[in-house]
Image (tube, grey):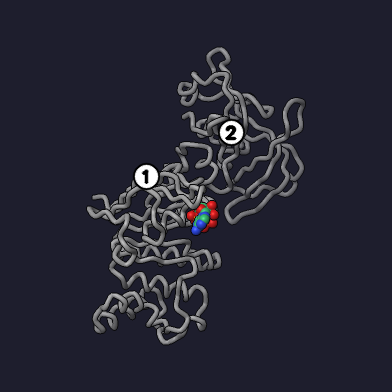
Amino acid sequence: MTAIAVDNLVKEFGDKRAVDGVGFTTGESELLVLVGPSGCGKTTTLRMLAGLEPVSSGTIRFGDREVTDVRPRDRSIAMVFQDYAILPHLTVFENIAYGLRSRRTPRAVVKDKVPEAARTFRIDHLLDRKPRQLSGGERQRVALSRSMVRDADLYLYDEPLSNLDAQLRYSAREDILTLHRRKKRPTIYVTHDQSEAMALGDRIAVMNAGRIQQIGTGEELYERPVNRFVAFFIGTPSINLFTMELKNVDGDMVASGCGLDLRLPESIAHRIRAYAGRKIELGVRPEHLHVPRMAPFDVTEDNTIHGVVTVIEPSATGSTVYLSTPEEAGAEPQDFTATFKVRMPASYLDQEVPLGIDLEKVHLFDAETGDSLL
Ligand code: ATP
């Protein structure tokens, strides 16, 4: 059953369209992440869902009930903000109890629920403290406990982890998933961090310039991005993009440019014959570039790119290598990135190396519109 249905939501601030026709539905216990760069309209969308920002047009439904113009307090929403919105003069206990008390919940229920939530988030020993006596991570868990004690129709999170250091972020993600699994209610989570989106979302909606570009599971967005924006935004390091021309050479489809002539495999070629002569951007994920002797396919001149190694960055599981195509007549050098599951020795710095491109895994975008051709 559909839990939340948002249709053609628009928000204008003066002549600026911050949200430009956003629509989506969520399942009954789905965690949907809204992700996108700063200023793309995520927070404004969330605030309209909460009723904190009136909509310019469009509708919001919770189940059978249209709530577009319903006051925030009548919407049954629990929200966790970036700054946690913790009240400094109240103790941890009172902060967690705040939403219950303002809804006239019986004292006995408050006395049960608050310590239970605090236990879930490991802050039950801090109930008498004031917020200023807490660390950032503890404050964040107070905010989570406060939303846990509420029985809401919809849970909203606006970048709740952005004030935490990397280590705490990971454990806080677990806490959020714990809360979500217990509540089994629709949840919408805003972040600009694609790896956080991947870690948390049942599905992810990628936003840009006020619009949803694509909604899908992390895997769908990664493997079948509908356009260049989604391909570039999802995945770290980002996908490499090469501007090229598609040519039909005796029936073979060849991507030509940046000093490369790449013969595309039939699995891709048969879908793009109609685009011969067009400018495209070829997208190659860094992990789909291989040192020839370790490639899971034959590396030939039809699928090789040469690069001069400019930086080698060791990682826990291998290395990220930054390269630049060699200077040649007619082609500007282009930077690109490769990730390997082995450590690349420092002696490769400044050396030119051949890398095999796994052409079965490349993405092709129309150079003008950015739309995927596959
Ligand atoms: P961030 O990740 O930086 O928080 P966001 O994706 O959440 O960004 P919004 O805060 O929704 O983006 O803002 C979307 C656009 O609307 C931005 O260009 C912002 O400057 C503009 N905007 C937001 N609130 C207002 C307002 N009250 N008045 C005018 N413009 C606003």
| Residue nearest the observer in this picture, 96 or 269 | 96
Where is 373 relative to 74, above or below?
A: above
Disc 2 and disc 1: Cα gap in Å?
41 Å
Left or right, residue 17 beside residue 101 = right
- Residue for badge 2: 357
Q: Residue at x 41, y 77 (%)?
A: 122
Q: Where in the figure is residue 107, as x and y percent of width and height?
A: 26, 84
Q: Residue at x 57, y 53 (%)?
A: 317
Q: Residue at x 73, y 39 (%)?
A: 308
Q: Where in the figure is residue 155, as x and y percent of width and height?
A: 35, 62
User: For the residue marked with disc 2, what is the amino acid?
Assistant: Ile
Left or right, residue 61 beside residue 319 = left
Q: Where in the figure is residue 98, as x and y percent of width and height?
A: 36, 78
Mark linked to residue 289? none
Left or right, residue 138 beside residue 70 = right
Q: Residue at x 28, y 75 (%)?
A: 103
Q: Tell whether label 1 touches label 2 (CB within 8 Å).
A: no
Q: Where in the figure is residue 330, as x and y percent of width and height?
A: 74, 25
| Residue nearest the observer in this picture, 352 or 293 | 352
Q: Quadrant of residue 294?
A: top right
- Residue for badge 1: 8
Where is 240 relative to 59, above or below?
A: above
